[in-house]
Amino acid sequence: MKELDFLPEWYKDDKRRQGHVRRQYVALVAVFLVMMLFNALALHRAGKAAAEGARLENQRVGAEAVVHEFDVLTKQLNELKSRAGLVEQMDSQVDIAAVLAELSHVISGSAVVRKLEIQAERFGRMEEKGQTKGSAVRLANGSGNSEKDVPLGRVKFRIVLTGVAAHPADVADLVCRLDESAYFQQVHPVFYGNAKARTGPKSAPPPQEGGTAVLSQSALDVTEFEIACYLANYKEMDD
């Protein structure tokens, strides 16, 4: 028997169109879902990138602050080094109190020092080469002469003792004690000679009652001396 198809063609065409449209809707929904997923992934990555950028910006700001602080500290350190260098140039590195204590120990009772001078001098050999190691400070009221420059820093000290002794042998004994001391070197007497030392004053009895007392002095023979030496804070080396 022959199978008869009672469905009209328009109905079949309509079914085919509906199936085609259904497939198009499914494809559109799939594309939409893929686009939504891609958009979500893109937003997530953009958020992570923004967070990373903010973190790097914070690190950059912190690094700039550290660099600025480092520059400030470096500048302060350079200023302190400059001041320390100036202080080191001005510091003679000599304990004057210890020198005076050694002098009081060396000088005996038979010699009396009336004047003590401690003079700072540049090293002569360095001066000849124009490489003076000690700095010089000029007096504010000076006229600019080099004689008024006060050398500071690593310099040698010349000590001059001026006084009197009871006998010439006491002067020689003082020179020997200074030469034996580890604090002094190049000890030599500049001069010594006889001198008169006055003692008193003493009051004599008045010539008459109600008169004014007359003051008298007695003279003693002493030895006046001047001794020069250098503080042993350096050692000369031969070329």
Image (tube, rainbow, N blue to C red):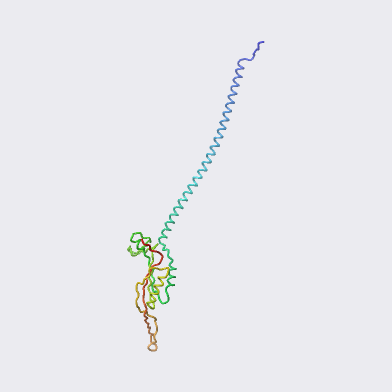
Side (left or right) of 175 relative to 45: left
Query: Residue 174: which quarter of the image?
Result: bottom left
In the rendered image, the residue lying farthest to the front is: 238
Judged from this view, the residue extending furthest toward the bottom is 208
- Position of residue 206 measured from the top left corner of the image (x, y, whole percent): 39, 87
Where is residue 188 drawn, in percent x and y? 36, 71
Q: In the rendered image of this protein, does residue 233 appear above or below residue 224?
A: above
Between residue 214 and residue 81, name the one nearer to us. Answer: 81
Relative to 34, is 50 above or below?
Answer: below
Q: Nearer the viewer, residue 196 or 231?
A: 231
Quadrant of the rendering where the C terminus is positioned: bottom left
**81 lies above or below 112:** above
Does residue 12 sit above or below 75 in this rendering? above
Q: Quadrant of residue 158?
A: bottom left
> Looking at the image, how many numbered discs can be counted on the residues?
0
Residue 200 image point, x, y percent: 39, 81
Name of the residue lying farthest toward the top? 1
Residue 147 position within the rendered picture, expressed as x and y whole percent measured from the top left = 33, 65
Rendered-image quadrant of the N terminus: top right
Foreground residue, 13 or 205? Answer: 205
